């Protein structure tokens, strides 16, 4: 009986989540939590100045470049994202930075070497910077990209000038149960290694995070009602 109830709850969560995603796409104005006056912002650039690939040790990585600022800034998207996920931010940031928007392994047009982890994506980012001669970049990541940013700062402490981690979690158990149930149900149909990664990684300890020595800005949220 308990297993049946669990399956029903997961099914409801899965359906509700997808209905909400559709509603967000149709009525995005409903989900704006604040009104942003863009009049004081710089004019965003129209498009990336470069759209191409670079071959790393394990991945042929797709990336975009915006702007010509002195300080390099690398943007890392979330689970299932592409270079388009953070393109709007890149267009504005291009006024002050040289912005590199990477596409993680197993995502978008980047190649799929068959395995993925936050540590591997951190390694790819460091290799990407080395291949292009990028020194002391600021790393800004969203969701899975935020977790990758934390891995970069912990495992390669001399690499980033600073990191901005937006919406990371320290372990899957931090998720709300309905979200985990929805991902598990989705995985029944997809058998997706991106879902597997979310359900099993990361496992950050206080000792691991204490390895971070660069300036770090953490952006997080809470539920609203």
Image: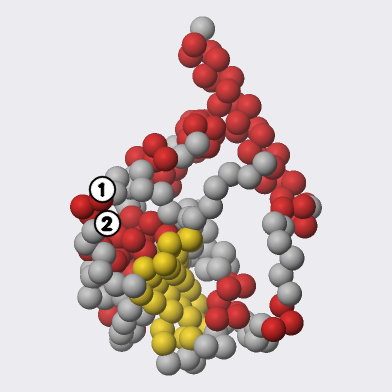
Number of numbered discs overlaid on the protein picture? 2
Residue 74 placement: quadrant: bottom left
Where is mark 1, residue-wise? Answer: 205
Name the residue rendered at 26%, 64% in the picture.
212
Give how far apart the Cα atoms at labels 2 and 1 are. 6 Å
Q: Whole-percent x and y of residue 57? A: 26, 68
Q: Are there few (<14), some (14-19), or many (20+) residues within 10 Å of tag 2?
A: some
Q: Nearer the viewer, residue 47 or 164?
A: 164
Residue 133 appears in view: yes
Callout 1: 10 Å neighbours few (<14), some, many (20+)?
Answer: few
Describe the colour scheme in one phrase: secondary structure
Image height of 85 relative to 12, above or below: below
Would you place residue 22 above or below residue 128 in this image?
above
- Residue at screen point 42% across, 40% down: 174
Residue 117 drawn at (x, y percent) = 32, 52
Between 219 and 124, the one lying in front of the other is 219
Residue carrying label 2: 209
Image coords of residue 19 (percent x, y): 70, 39
Helix, strand or loop status at disc 1: loop
Q: Is residue 171 above or below residue 185?
A: below
Q: Position of residue 25 (x, y in %)?
A: 72, 53
Pick the residue in front: 160 or 124: 160
Quarter of the view holding residue 49? bottom right
The answer to whether marks 2 and 1 mark residues whose Cβ atoms lie closer than 8 Å is: yes
> Does residue 128 show up?
no
Which residue is at a point 29% across and 66% down the rendered structure image? 153
Q: Residue furthest top?
A: 1
Q: Considering the numbered disc 2 on the image, is that residue within a helix, a strand or a loop? A: helix
* Residue at (65% x, 32% y) in the render: 15
Residue 109 left/right relative to 207: right
Image quarter hosting the C terminus = top right
């Amino acid at each position: 009986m308990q297993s049946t109830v669990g399956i029903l709850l997961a099914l409801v969560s899965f359906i509700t989540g997808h209905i909400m995603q559709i509603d967000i796409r149709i009525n995005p104005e409903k989900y704006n939590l604040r009104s942003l006056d863009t009049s004081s912002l710089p004019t965003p650039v129209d498009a990336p100045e470069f759209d191409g690939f670079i071959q790393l040790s394990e991945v042929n990585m797709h990336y975009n470049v915006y702007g010509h600022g002195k300080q390099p800034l690398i943007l890392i998207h979330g689970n299932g994202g592409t270079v388009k996920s953070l393109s709007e931010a890149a267009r504005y940031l291009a006024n002050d930075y040289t912005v590199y928007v990477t596409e993680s392994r197993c995502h978008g047009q980047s190649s799929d070497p068959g395995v993925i982890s936050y540590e591997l994506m951190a390694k790819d980012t460091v290799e990407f910077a080395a291949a292009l001669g990028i020194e002391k970049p600021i790393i800004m990541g969203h969701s899975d990209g935020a977790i990758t940013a934390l891995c970069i700062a912990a495992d390669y402490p001399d690499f980033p000038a600073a990191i901005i981690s937006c919406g990371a979690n320290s372990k899957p158990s931090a998720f709300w149960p309905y979200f985990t149930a929805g991902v598990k149900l989705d995985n029944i149909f997809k058998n997706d290694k991106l879902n597997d990664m979310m359900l099993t990684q990361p496992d950050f300890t206080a000792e691991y995070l204490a390895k971070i020595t660069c300036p770090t800005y953490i952006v997080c949220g809470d539920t609203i009602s």
